[in-house]
Amino acid sequence: VKILQGKVEVLGDNHNDSQDRIVRVKQDNSVLQARVVMLEEQTRDTEHRGEEKLAEEQRRNRELIQRIEREKTLTVENYSSKHVHLEKNNERLEEEVSRLKGKVERHQKERNDLEDRVLEAEQAANALREEGKKLAGQTKREQQEDIDRSNTIISELRSEVERLTGLLESKTRVRIPSTDSMTANTDHLSAALKTCKEENRSLEEQVEELQAQLLSKNIETGRELVIAAPKDSLAAEFEAMSQDEELRMSVREAQEVNKNLRTYIDGILLTIVENYPQLLEVKHKPA
């Protein structure tokens, strides 16, 4: 009986422990259920916030995609416009390159032609310089001959005037009636002789000056043709040649004037022969 009582007591204690354990379990279950409810509410709140956040992200993503699409469209349009512009520029540049190639070819051809013309001009200039030297030498010789002839004529005329003057003085002493007339003629001849001498001297100076100008111009023209041939045009070279031709014409004109002067002196002598032949006859009489 004691053993049974002990077992009953043990069973009672175990029952009490079980009851206590059940109570604790129920309490724990209540706490757990409350936590489950709280967690469910938290889960629902979290899901709701997640849905709202997802919706917001989706909205932002849609706006971002729309903005990117607009920017892409604008970029594509911009690049399309640039592409069209570049194509036009490319076509224009190709045309410009083609035009410049043609221009370069023309310039090259013109340069070759110009070099040939410059070479011809240099040869012509060399020939012109040689001709100028020859012409200057010939002109100088001709002028010297003209000067010598003029000096001879002037010397003869001076001698004739001196002879006429002496004759007038002698006739004055013998009282020839025509003394006044012959004196006037002699004065006229003396004045004409003086004028002729002055004109001859002036012509000599002009001829020397023209010869110096011609030589200087020929030398300067040759130097310019050698130094500035790639820059000057053929027309400028021909113009320089024309200036040399003008100088030669001036020399010829001076020669013509000198010739006229000799003709004038010859006319004076002819006048003496026609009007006063007796004076020339006196020259042959014995002293």
Image (cartoon, rainbow, N blue to C red):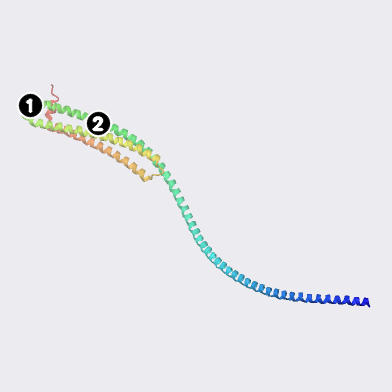
Q: Are marks 1 and 2 in contact (CB under 8 Å)?
A: no
At mark 2, the secondary structure is: helix
Residue where numbered disc 2 is placed: 147
The quadrant of the picture occupied by the C terminus is top left
- Dividing the picture into quadrants, the one containing residue 4 is bottom right
Residue lying farthest top? 287
Give the mark nearer the N terminus: 1 vs 2.
2
Residue where numbered disc 1 is placed: 172
Amino acid type of the residue tagged 1 in the rendering: Thr
Residue 69, percent from left and from top: 57, 68
| 117 horizontally vs 278: left or right | right
Between 246 and 101, the one nearer to me in the picture = 101
Residue 91, percent from left and from top: 49, 59
At mark 1, the secondary structure is: helix
Q: Residue at x 17, y 32 (%)?
A: 194
Q: Residue at x 10, y 30 (%)?
A: 183
Callout 1 crowding tier (Cα within 10 Å): few <14, some 14–19, many ≥20: some
